[in-house]
Image (cartoon, rainbow, N blue to C red):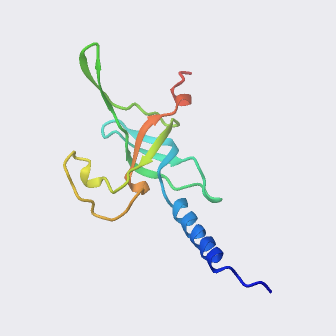
Amino acid sequence: MKNPDPAGTLARLMAAALSGQLAALNVAIPCRVMAFDTSTCKATVQPLIRSGSANPALIQSVPALGQRLSVGGVEQVYRPALHVGDTVLVVCADREIKNALSGQMANPDSGRTHNINDAVIVGVFPASLVEG
């Protein structure tokens, strides 16, 4: 019987642990809009990528980013207009964003990172922009 290679065993163990950690990391997720509140610019979204056999849980109260643009030298504010069924890209902030949403410097209340509770809608996929 061959002697096991301790370095190889350790490398496989570390690779498996790292793979598990990376699988739990949320960065950007394509989602379907299930509901949108125009007054708060927040949506309920359904992630469109499964990581197992069950559908992923809905993500509630996801803020949608607006835009402030200068058009013809006139500044205009554009609020999102999302429709049920739109496919959007949701990104998960590096750290908890709840305390920073007011625009003030803030410390997070938790140590969570890349969590779906800190998701933000950054845009709509082109297929949802087609008028039909």
Relative image position of residue 40 (x, y in whole percent):
31, 40
Task: Name the residue at the right extreme.
Answer: 1
In the image: residue 88, left or right of residue 53: left
**Spot occupied by residue 46 in the image (x, y as percentages of width and height):** 51, 48
Q: In this view, does 15 lie above or below 62?
A: below
Q: Quadrant of the C terminus?
A: top right
Residue at 80% across / 86% down in the picture?
1
Name the residue at 60% across, 53% down. Answer: 50
Identify the residue at horizontal 37%, vertical 62% (top origin). Answer: 112
Residue shown at 60% from the left, 57% from the top: 51
* Foreground pick, 101 / 106: 106
Query: Does 109 sit left or right of 3 as displayed?
Result: left
The percent coordinates of residue 122 (x first, y second) are: 41, 38
Q: Quadrant of residue 116?
A: bottom left
Q: Quick one: which residue is furthest to the top in this view?
A: 72
Image side of residue 100 versus residue 92, left or right: left
Indicate the position of residue 93 as horizontal and vertical percent values. 38, 51
Q: Please, which residue is most extreme toward the left here?
A: 104
Question: 10 or 20, which is in the foreground?
Answer: 10
* Count of residue discs: 0
Question: Would you say 73 lies left or right of 92 here?
Answer: left
Above/below status of 5 relative to 77: below
Q: In this view, does 89 lie above or below 2?
A: above
